[in-house]
Image (tube, helix red, strand yellow):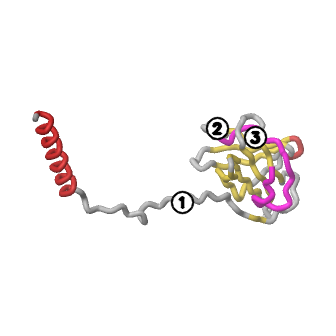
Amino acid sequence: MKDILITVAVFLLVVLAAIVVFNTRGTDTMDWEAIKMDFDVKEDSFSYEVADSEFNGIYQNMVKNTPTYCMVGKNLDGTYRIYFVKKVGIKSVVLRVDSLVVDSNGSASFQNNEGANLVSTFTNGGRQVVIKGAAYSVGDSSIAGTYNRVKNIRRFAMSEFNI
């Protein structure tokens, strides 16, 4: 008899809990349009003409064990375009510099996405690029380093990036 009373009491508690849950449920629905999530990961695409220069090419960071590259190409107006690319499954551009002015010593200064000042110096006849923080600057450890040329480019495009 005791087991029957316990079973009835548990049944009544379950029914009471179901009634409370049913009566207190909310009417809000998830607005999936307000949540902007793009799961379609694409590689960057771009294509620019390059003028002849000894610096045109794709350079790989040799100091770190990271898949970081920089692509350098001379614009038709005499300035340089340099994109820092990380290759982890897909190739993604982490920093774009479109109008870099290189002085006669092969040096140029620019800023990263956070505004830190960096200096690029082309050495060894354009076969190497050294990226470091400018004087009195915090720099950028994710792209700083010594990059060696691994490939010349005919066009400043991600399609040239077959490494």
| Disc 1 residue crowd, few under 14, some 14–19, many 20+, Cα 10 Å | few
Question: Mark number for residue 98?
Answer: none
**Residue 87 spot, x, y in % from top left:** 70, 47
Instruction: Return the residue at label 1.
Output: 38
Instruction: Return the residue at label 2.
Output: 141
Instruction: Return the residue at label 3.
Output: 61
Task: Identify which amino acid the numbered label 1 is placed on.
Answer: Asp
Does the magenta portion include 144?
Answer: yes
Which residue is at a point 86% across and 46% down the rendered structure image?
Answer: 126
Say if mark 3 contacts mark 2, CB within 8 Å: no
In this picture, is 65 found above or below 56? above
**Residue 58 spot, x, y in % from top left:** 80, 50
| Closest to the observer, 143 or 76 | 143
Give the alpha-carbon distance from disc 2 to disc 1, as whole Å.
28 Å
Which residue is at a point 33% across and 62% down the rendered structure image?
Answer: 29
Q: Secondary structure at mark 3?
A: strand
Task: Identify which amino acid the numbered label 2 is placed on.
Answer: Ser
- Which of the 4 image quarters holds residue 119? top right
| Viewer-nearest of discs 2 and 1 | 1
**Residue 118 spot, x, y in % from top left:** 67, 43
Please give left or right for residue 106 compared with residue 22 in the image.
right
Does the magenta portion include 45?
Answer: no
Q: Secondary structure at mark 2?
A: loop
Please give left or right for residue 9 compared with residue 54 in the image.
left
Which residue is at a point 20% across and 52% down the rendered structure image?
Answer: 18
| Disc 2 residue crowd, few under 14, some 14–19, many 20+, Cα 10 Å | few
What span is in magenta?
A: 141-163
**Residue 102 spot, x, y in % from top left:** 78, 51
